Image (spheres, coloured by chain):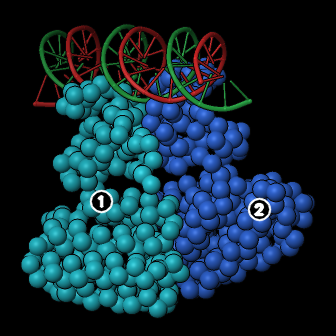
Chain colours: A cyan, B blue, C red, D green
Amino acid sequence: MVNLKVSYDEYIPLRDIVFKTLREAIITGDLKPGERLMEIKLANELGVSRTPVREAIRKLELEGLVIMTARKGAEVAPINEKDLKEVLEIRKSLESLACELACKNAASEDIVKMRDLNKAIEKAIKEENIEKITKQDVDFHEAIYLTTKNDRLVHMLHQLKEHIFRYRFEYIKDMKNKEMIVEEHKKIIAAIEQNNAKAACKEIERHIEVQEKYILNTLIKEAK
Amino acid sequence: MVNLKVSYDEYIPLRDIVFKTLREAIITGDLKPGERLMEIKLANELGVSRTPVREAIRKLELEGLVIMTARKGAEVAPINEKDLKEVLEIRKSLESLACELACKNAASEDIVKMRDLNKAIEKAIKEENIEKITKQDVDFHEAIYLTTKNDRLVHMLHQLKEHIFRYRFEYIKDMKNKEMIVEEHKKIIAAIEQNNAKAACKEIERHIEVQEKYILNTLIKEAK
DNA sequence: GTTGTGTATATTGTATACAAAATGATACAT
DNA sequence: ATGTATCATTTTGTATACAATATACACAAC
């Protein structure tokens, strides 16, 4: 049986390409907080007309990555501690929910996947490859998200992560005991495997609190 | 000293007016699930050009109220039980977080406001004014949200509520013991007043679970 | 030097134009 | 009746045009 799905995926509207491009630029800091997003300038740089740029900006506005002022235009949303704290507060709650749901739904292959990813993190730590650690850590959490079977929750967690990445300044490199991450992940996996929602929530919350501490520390250090 | 703040508020771009108009229409069911949103038709009906309509649709897309298919256009997002359950799951978690934060921050005037609103609900129940009950109940929860001082959380809860309202079919009218709402609210207020986060969370979760039951019942009944 | 005013320029907000693709109706063949 | 081929129409996707507002700079007045 061949795969008969018509590949509508082929075509992606320019507005979506522009949207992803600008979002990436904001998250990585290529576009700096407070920087104005001028339509004609961006359109020229990207080689498109103003229309797709405008539509992309409308979406970024709703995501909170850009701030609009009527008749003045858009600028990259500023970074500040209050905003970060708000995001982290919500994230902790939703990651905890994700773990709770993962306990309900996790199949054995989900657990295997989490263990594999955690081993990959361990390996990356030994290699002292910061970038790889960061990426694998994201993948590990992603594996939990997907286990929830709650698409909206996955989407919301992605959005929150975008905001956190804006502040991230590679905070992982400041962590002393990176091996702790692996240990914490192990506890989380164990709790999910045993369908122990209470324990899983407790562990993930503690895990995230540790990260929060480092993220906030890095932010304060950068501000100086 | 006069108030010198420049009233930029006066001017609202057409796209925002169109956005709010369409959102309202979708939430109230004026625009039915699955209905196509055709730009020229909407533009004519609203007396504007296609541009603001398109930009409004871009925002609705990100809110999940419309579904886009490339080169086919937008349609009102369908209503289904899975989606509702996802939203309710997340909402419970975030309302619980809101209560937790309210416990931290609540000033005495916040408590007074909540008590007043709850009394208004009690009155509306006695008058058997369903619409008023619904509205005051929203206001009551809003009072909790605002106490959190977490703007992003407030915004996210608003977005979730939009989706719930789409399903709501006036579920409150089906509730037998409407006085229960008032009693549950009282418990929540008391817990917040005593800064007892654990109790507040427990109470709001129970409160929402009761509502969920009625919302899902109403949905199933409607489906028949 | 500071403040105010006018004007040119840049930028957004909105409308329209044009191209490409999807849709739907009709005619025709099986 | 069913399928399909064709073609006009509709609709989206993108670019551009025009109007209204905001910005910036020069220059005058004090």
Mark sitting on residue B220 = 2
Looking at this view, is A193 or B27 the one in front?
A193
Q: Are marks 2 and 1 on the same chain?
A: no
Looking at this view, is A209 or B135 the one in front?
A209
Residue D22: quadrant of the picture:
top left
Q: Viewed as shown, does residue A133 lie left or right of A64? A: left
> What residue is rendered at 43% in x and 83% in y?
A108
Q: Pointer 1: what residue?
A: A80
In the rendered image, residue A152, in percent from the top left (x then y), is placed at 50, 60
In the rendered image, residue B153, in percent from the top left (x then y), is placed at 49, 63
Mark sitting on residue B139 = none
> What residue is rendered at 23% in x and 68% in y?
A135
Query: Which of the image's four quarters has the N terminus of chain A?
Result: bottom left
Identify whether D4 is placed above or below B132: above
Disc 1 packing (10 Å; few <14; some 14–19; many ≥20)? few
Identify whether A39 is placed above or below B66: above
How far apart are labels 2 and 1 at the CA level? Answer: 45 Å
What's under tag 1, amino acid-wise? Asn
Identify whether A132 is placed above or below A47: below
> What residue is rendered at 77% in x and 56% in y?
B223
In the rendered image, residue B10, in percent from the top left (x then y), is placed at 51, 31
What is the chain letter for disc 1?
A
